[in-house]
Image (spheres, rainbow, N blue to C red):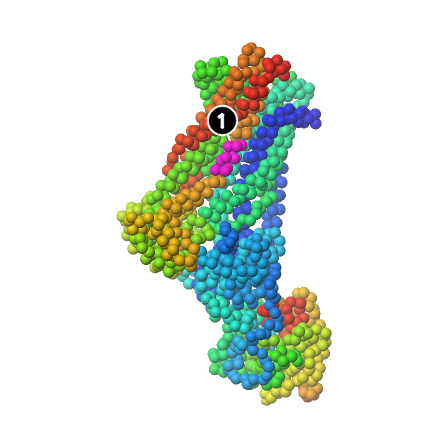
């Protein structure tokens, strides 16, 4: 008890130090928790809304790009006698007057719903409005919350927008969810009769899928066989979970990358905890020695140090959890937007405060602090009885330890390198290797400090005289306490450099790619809810005809994005109707353009993007199996092209091939090549007028589309940038706390120097030179380490996560900024101690001990 | 040598980390348990309840009309609802004489007087519902299934020529130009029937030349005819076994726009086939106050096919027993004594199984019964079907369920 009171007193005497390290750990925990919470919330929102739609279906019959012919259902019901069955038509719609609001339109046959979505069906007897819903066109049910948010009541008219067309509907009933879970699942759901949904989505004759409830066991297998036998070639049966699994797999790499970045912040926080505990032990060596003389055992000393660490961990974690929840609200928006830009539509209304995520954060925070305290606790236990070791001995020992640490660092670096190289396609292992590389670099830091300070001593002495020499020597004499802080700063700055170089390289690559791949002058598309490629929207055929015939248009390329299934899952297919003039938009990584084009245009061959080839381990010559409306077919791959539009990759076939195998006349977008000398912006204006009012269209010039694409790119990395800033903030706080404590501790030493005639001005110079030297060492080390990090991120992590090849660009400004940041952080850390010591007359400083 | 401090300090740290880990594990498990809650649930609040009596726009059964066959075997879309109702008692042919009862019913309900013009082929105003029940007396099993489908895309429908009523793969198909023989095929999993029904006696028109009044109010009536003695042969499947069967079936055809008066809660319906070649149809409309509506009626079909209408007071019905359903505790009458003095009939009607409650969207009891008693002083035996509607809390009748 007495011992603990002594600890508390110590912490109270050094509130700044304790507070700053508290803040550092708390920030680390906050970053981890907020990233985890926001991606868990997005996943949960997706899973729940999928559950609302999937209900109790075990399997689904799915079709080609345009869905399923509705006669399949009749075939299954009447001829094959399959029961129960539920046809579903679904799509995403937006709401007029509520920009950014996305609703999921679920079209069902209420009479088939009871076995699948009891919340809608309940034997159909539970729904009094069934008659109106079925017989009256344009009637819908909306979840009561959504209705309230949109400000529509019962019998109100709501104008939905589907692929840019206005579709007024009447709300005839409100779905009242029976609990928080249901409320979340049903949020943003619009339920309509199947007929109404087909009409609203402009898909007469087509179903999105047919739900089946197949029991497990041999009876179920027989049933599945009967279903399969009754299906036309373009349709197939898939487990209902397949879609959610596919969606889960879509964002896995994204999630892993976010988690790794957030862990980086925690690692920096861990360095801080270690640093704080070490400092507090070092500061109290005398006290500890005295206590030992009074009969306190080693175990008790260890217990006290660990108890302190635990206290620090608990308080910091509690703070971090609160901060994390607050931060998660903001991150959730970024995460959701990125998922919507890149992967699929998910509407996340609220943060799901998963207790599991919070517990994980708490365990990480407290556990990491305790682990970080292990070494200082051991050190405290070795304090000799009676008197403290002189610091000079300690420092000598630390300097001797530096080469040993460096040797260990080299070993860790080598291990990390081996792990990274040998990780195969495993992203988690690659990151583990990356973290080992970071740790190895951190272990090299003390030796580098000794070397750098020795080398800098002479130079600084010539520049600043005595204070300069003293500063360099000061660094040498405090390696035991500054080493960790400098390593932490180095790691954080290196992360900044690494991630910065990676993003800039990536962006430069994408800019180059956009320049070559956007060859048309004007692009026309129907608005889609999901960003990126190939939504379900198609252009009105008469709009296409009108634009083709527009004056000033020399050539028209068509583009149709569609999802088809392949044996390895869902595949993004693009049907490309372009002429030879547009061939140059492709840069082939495998296959030569001379042989690719004839085979692609006439020979029914496919070309695949680099990520697709990487993901599915395909190369030129391999057959690619896709399910077509004529059954499963093999398409020879004749080329692999560079593409940064989708990390899932795309398969492209010619329009001609597409129409031979899929019954889909739809066009998603057009690329118009203008006659020479036309003004793109002027033509865009004319085209807008010509397209008419029937459908909202996105008509964009080449430049505008390129800008929009880069905007999405930047948005995607917004969250990465935020995390980078947070990790750096943690490091800066750590350095502040470590250096400030160190300098304050040197008050006596400086008092001696003052007494010997050192002027306050010279105190300033001494302190700031020393801290900026430390910052410079951290920054200087961070540059090579950061570039190494970037190389691993670009050539290993990105390639394994997404399959992209990125050309490395090392922008000088990123490096300069990083070193500047390190020095500035260190300088800032020196200001307060310098100010205090310069003001203090020498005598009180001497008396203090 | 003393153990280093490292060893000793490792223990508390590991303990603390393990403690935190265990706590974490527990929370995750609790979380998983919570999220394993079964289904989403929700209720609906609506702008307007579907008016039970909104008969506007539909034809009404007001006066007697001429019946024409086969046209009247087909649908009558001008009326709101109608049904094709087959019930029958069967025995395993030859062998054991194992007894079965079957019911196959198709209901058509119009959700609106007219269908709006739609682009989607799913647009319709007619919904079909079908019930299949099989009573396997020897094994004590009663199977009941229901199906629903809209009259769109050939998922369900009816036509007079050729005669067909179907819902998915459940179907009744006429072999002859005028309807019968009718082949009934329906099944699911281990319950299946495939029966061919001959014409038997000529159609019997109930009430006033086929106009069957259900209450004093004009229009609360249906057009109603039956084929009361259809010879059956075919096959039934129960519990994984097939049985070749033969026996007698009864077909009821009724169409109307509104039938029950507001103070009527349900009905008891009897269709009995006696071994003296007479048949008896009886419906008793029960009132909220416990009484039997004056409009309750019956028809006695003589051996040569002549019919006599029985008004309410010509029949004395005594409930001898009651049965409580294990599903919701509904109490149904379970054994009856029917006395029709004018016809010299005194019959004891006993269910072949107590539990023949159809647990479908609208819960009701409909089951095979045995008959014994005396006719004109001579012993008479028979079989038939009894339907008890409006006892369960859920819905007044099968057809009402669609509308509610």
Residue A705 as seen in the image, left or right of residue A381: left
Disc 1: which residue: A824
Residue, x 55% and y 81% (percent of image)?
Answer: B231
Q: In this orientation, which residue lies closer to the viewer: A81 or A804? A: A804
Give the SS element for disc 1: helix
Residue A727 on the magenta span:
yes
Image height of A446 relative to B205, above or below:
above
The residue furthest top is A756
Q: Position of residue A394 (x, y in %)?
A: 56, 18
Residue, x 47% and y 79% (percent of image)?
Answer: B161
Residue A118 on the magenta span:
no
Which chain does tag 1 point to?
A: A
Residue, x 57% and y 55% (percent of image)?
Answer: A151
Residue, x 62% and y 53% (percent of image)?
Answer: A179
Quarter occupied by residue A204: bottom left
Span colored in magenta: A721-730
Location of the N terminus of chain A by quadrant is top right
Magenta: main secondary structure? helix
Instruction: Characterize the local packing of mark 1: few (<14), some (14-19) or many (20 or more) Cα atoms within 10 angstroms.
Output: some
The residue furthest left is A594
Q: Position of residue A559 (x, y in %)?
A: 37, 53
Q: Position of residue A836 (x, y in %)?
A: 58, 20
Location of the C terminus of chain A by quadrant is top right
Image height of B368 relative to A301, above or below:
below
């Amino acid at each position: 008890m007495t011992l603990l009171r002594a600890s508390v007193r110590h912490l109270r005497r050094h509130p700044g130090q304790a507070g700053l390290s508290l803040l550092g750990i708390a920030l680390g925990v906050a970053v981890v928790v907020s990233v985890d919470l926001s991606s868990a919330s997005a996943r949960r929102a997706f899973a729940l809304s999928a559950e609302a739609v999937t209900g109790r279906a075990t399997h689904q019959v799915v079709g080609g790009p345009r869905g399923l012919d509705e006669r399949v259902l009749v075939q299954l019901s009447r001829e094959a006698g399959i029961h129960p069955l539920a046809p579903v038509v679904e799509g995403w719609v937006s709401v007029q007057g509520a920009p950014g609001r996305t609703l999921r339109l679920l079209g069902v046959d209420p009479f088939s719903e009871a076995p699948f979505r009891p919340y809608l069906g309940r034997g159909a007897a539970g729904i009094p409005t069934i008659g109106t819903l079925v017989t009256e066109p344009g009637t819908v049910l909306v979840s009561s919350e959504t209705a309230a948010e949109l400000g529509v009541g019962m019998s109100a008219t709501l104008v939905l927008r589907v692929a840019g067309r206005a579709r007024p509907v009447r709300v005839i009933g409100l779905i009242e969810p029976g609990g928080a879970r249901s409320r979340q699942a049903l949020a943003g759901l619009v339920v309509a009769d199947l007929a109404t949904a087909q009409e609203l989505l402009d898909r007469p004759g087509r179903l999105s899928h047919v739900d089946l409830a197949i029991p497990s066991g041999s009876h179920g297998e027989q049933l599945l066989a009967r279903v399969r036998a009754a299906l036309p070639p373009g349709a197939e049966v898939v487990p209902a979970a397949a879609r959610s699994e596919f969606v889960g797999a879509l964002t896995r790499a994204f999630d892993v990358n976010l988690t790794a970045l957030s862990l980086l912040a925690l690692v920096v926080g861990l360095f801080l905890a270690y640093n704080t505990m070490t400092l507090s032990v070092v500061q109290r060596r005398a006290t500890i020695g005295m206590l030992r003389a009074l009969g306190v055992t080693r175990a008790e000393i260890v217990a006290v140090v660990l108890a302190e660490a635990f206290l620090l961990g608990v308080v910091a974690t509690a703070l971090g959890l609160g901060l994390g929840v607050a931060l998660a609200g903001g991150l959730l928006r970024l995460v959701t937007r990125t998922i919507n830009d890149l992967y699929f539509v998910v509407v996340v209304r609220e943060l799901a405060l998963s207790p599991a995520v919070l517990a994980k954060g708490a365990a990480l925070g407290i556990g990491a602090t305790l682990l970080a305290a292990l070494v200082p606790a051991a050190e405290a236990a070795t304090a000799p009885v009676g008197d403290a070791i002189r610091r000079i001995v300690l420092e000598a020992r630390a300097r001797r330890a530096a080469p040993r640490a460096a040797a260990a660092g080299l070993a860790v670096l080598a291990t990390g390198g081996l792990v990274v190289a040998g990780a195969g396609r495993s992203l988690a292992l690659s990151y583990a290797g990356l973290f080992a590389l970071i740790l190895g670099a951190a272990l090299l830091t003390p030796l580098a400090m000794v070397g750098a300070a020795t080398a800098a001593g002479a130079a600084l002495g010539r520049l600043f005289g005595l204070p300069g020499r003293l500063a360099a020597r000061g660094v040498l004499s405090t390696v035991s306490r500054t080493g960790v802080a400098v390593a932490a700063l180095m790691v954080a700055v290196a992360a900044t450099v690494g991630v910065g170089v990676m993003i800039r390289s990536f962006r430069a690559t994408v800019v180059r790619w956009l320049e070559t791949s956007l060859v048309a002058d004007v692009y026309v598309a129907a608005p889609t809810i999901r960003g990126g490629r190939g939504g379900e929207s198609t252009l009105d055929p008469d709009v296409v005809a009108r634009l083709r015939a527009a004056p000033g248009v020399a050539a028209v390329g068509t583009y149709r994005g569609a999802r088809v299934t392949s044996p390895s899952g869902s595949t993004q297919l693009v049907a490309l109707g372009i002429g030879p003039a547009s061939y140059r938009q492709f840069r082939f990584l495998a296959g030569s353009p001379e042989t690719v084009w004839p085979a692609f245009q006439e020979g029914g061959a496919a070309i695949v993007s680099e990520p697709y080839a990487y993901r599915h381990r395909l190369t030129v010559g391999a057959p690619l199996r896709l399910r077509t409306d004529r059954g499963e077919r093999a398409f020879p791959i004749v080329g692999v092209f560079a593409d940064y539009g989708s990390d899932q990759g795309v398969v492209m076939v010619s329009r001609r091939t597409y129409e031979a195998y899929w019954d889909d006349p739809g066009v998603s977008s057009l690329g118009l090549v203008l006659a020479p000398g036309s003004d793109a912006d002027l033509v865009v204006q004319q085209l807008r007028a010509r397209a008419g009012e029937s459908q909202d269209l996105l008509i964009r010039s080449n430049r505008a589309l390129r800008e929009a694409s880069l905007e999405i790119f930047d948005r995607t990395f917004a969250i990465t940038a935020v995390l980078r800033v947070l990790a750096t903030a943690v490091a800066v706080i750590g350095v502040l706390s470590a250096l400030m404590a160190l300098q304050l501790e040197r008050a006596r030493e400086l008092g001696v120097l003052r007494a010997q005639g050192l002027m306050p001005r010279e105190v300033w110079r001494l302190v700031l030179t020393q801290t900026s030297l430390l910052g410079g060492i951290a920054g200087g080390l961070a540059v090579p380490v950061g570039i190494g990090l970037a190389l691993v991120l670009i050539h290993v992590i990105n390639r394994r996560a997404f399959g992209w090849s990125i050309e490395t660009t090392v922008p000088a400004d990123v490096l300069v900024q990083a070193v500047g940041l390190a020095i500035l952080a260190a300088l800032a850390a020196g200001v307060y101690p310098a100010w205090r010591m310069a003001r203090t007359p020498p005598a009180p400083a001497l008396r203090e001990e | 040598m003393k153990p280093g401090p490292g060893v000793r300090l490792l223990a508390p740290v590991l303990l603390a980390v393990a403690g935190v880990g265990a706590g974490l594990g527990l929370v995750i498990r609790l979380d998983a348990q919570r999220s394993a809650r079964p289904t989403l649930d929700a209720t609906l609040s609506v702008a307007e309840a579907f008016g039970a009596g909104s008969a506007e726009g539909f034809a009404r059964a007001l006066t007697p009309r001429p019946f024409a066959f086969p046209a009247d075997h087909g649908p009558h879309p001008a009326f709101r609802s109608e049904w094709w109702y087959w019930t029958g008692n069967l025995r395993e042919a030859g062998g054991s004489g194992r007894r079965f009862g079957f019911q196959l019913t198709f209901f058509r309900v119009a959700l609106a007087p007219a269908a709006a013009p739609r682009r989607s082929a799913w647009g319709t105003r007619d919904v079909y519902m079908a019930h299949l029940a099989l009573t396997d007396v020897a094994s004590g099993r009663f199977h009941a299934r229901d199906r629903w489908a809209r009259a769109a895309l050939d998922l369900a429908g009816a036509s007079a020529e050729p005669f067909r009523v179907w819902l998915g793969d459940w179907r009744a198909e006429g072999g002859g130009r005028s309807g019968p023989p009718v082949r009934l095929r329906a099944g699911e999993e281990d319950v299946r029937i495939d029966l061919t029904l001959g014409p038997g006696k000529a159609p019997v028109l109930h009430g006033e030349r086929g106009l069957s009044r259900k209450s004093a109010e004009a229009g609360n009536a249906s057009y109603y005819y039956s084929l009361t003695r259809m010879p059956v042969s075919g096959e039934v499947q129960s519990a994984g076994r097939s049985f070749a069967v033969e026996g007698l079936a009864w077909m009821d055809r009724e169409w109307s726009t509104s039938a029950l008066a507001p103070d009527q809660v349900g009905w008891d319906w009897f269709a009995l086939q006696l071994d003296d070649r007479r048949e008896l149809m009886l419906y008793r409309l029960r009132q909220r106050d416990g009484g039997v509506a004056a409009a309750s009626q019956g028809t006695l079909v003589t051996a040569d096919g002549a019919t006599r209408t029985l008004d309410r007071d010509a029949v004395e019905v005594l409930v001898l027993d009651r049965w409580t359903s294990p599903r919701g505790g509904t109490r149904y009458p379970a054994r009856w004594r029917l006395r029709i003095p004018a016809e010299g009939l005194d019959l004891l009607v006993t269910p072949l199984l107590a539990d023949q409650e159809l647990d479908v969207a609208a819960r009701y009891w409909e089951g095979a019964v045995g008959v014994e008693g005396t006719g004109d002083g001579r012993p008479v035996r028979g079989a038939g079907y009894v339907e008890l509607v409006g006892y369960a809390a859920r819905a007044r009748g099968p057809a009402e369920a669609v509308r509610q």
